[in-house]
Amino acid sequence: MLYLKEANTQDVEKEYLFVTNTPKDENGFTNAYFGCTREEFENTVLPEYINCSKGINLKAGHVPQTTFFLWDGDTIVGMFRLRHCLNENLAKGAGHIGYGIGKEFRGRGYANEGLRLTLEKAREIIKEDEIYMSVDKDNAPSLKAQLKNGAYIHHEDEEGLYTRIKK
């Protein structure tokens, strides 16, 4: 059974393993915490995830963002970030939702289903009329998941495609 669960202290060990095994930048999904120590994750990263979802101690230029983990039973298979609103940079770039699926779990429909679940939450949270996303041009599976969930390509540049989904 697939479900989303917000970053939390009860699942710290599995969250830590997923985050620290996710590359720094892969297919446009960035992870500033690749390779951090267990102590750093528990004392700094996880509290940052939780506070950010509440709009507490946001870094300059950042917006509230909820980090969800996609679970298949008792295994984390993906990570989804839902930004509650857009600033100028997000509107032109990453958008409301960013996600990554663990390498060993790709090609099984997890991105499609995780995105569907995240979109349900996005429709409750975001104020904009459309949900903004982006995808690297060479990441066809991610684009396919977005299109399958109702996205259309709004515009593109040299590196990426910028999609929108009507709320």
Image: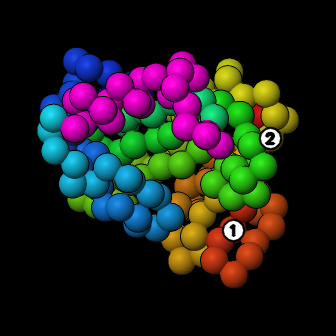
Quadrant (top left, top right, bottom left, bottom right) of the N terminus: top left
Q: Residue at x 16, y 44 (%)?
A: 37
Picture mark count: 2
Kindly indicate the quadrant of the structure image that contains residue 163. Answer: bottom right
The vertical placement of 84 against 110, above or below, is above
Where is residue 114 drawn, in percent x and y?
47, 40
Q: Is residue 142 left or right of residue 131?
A: left
Q: Residue at x 46, y 58 (%)?
A: 29
| The one of 45 and 68 positioned closer to us in this rendering | 45
Q: Secondary structure at mark 2?
A: strand
Q: Is residue 46 magenta?
A: yes
Q: Which residues are magenta?
A: 40-62
Q: Residue at x 84, y 35 (%)?
A: 129
Residue to which mark 2 is pinned:
130
Q: Secondary structure at mark 1?
A: strand
Residue type beneath disc 1: Leu
Residue type beneath disc 2: Glu
Q: Which mark is residue 57?
A: none
Quadrant (top left, top right, bottom left, bottom right) of the C terminus: top right
Furthest-front residue in this view: 60
Furthest-bottom residue in this view: 158
Where is residue 69 drawn, in percent x and y?
37, 35
How crowded pointer 2 is (Cα within 10 Å; few <14, some 14-19, many 20+) is rated as some
The vertical placement of 88 against 152, above or below, is above
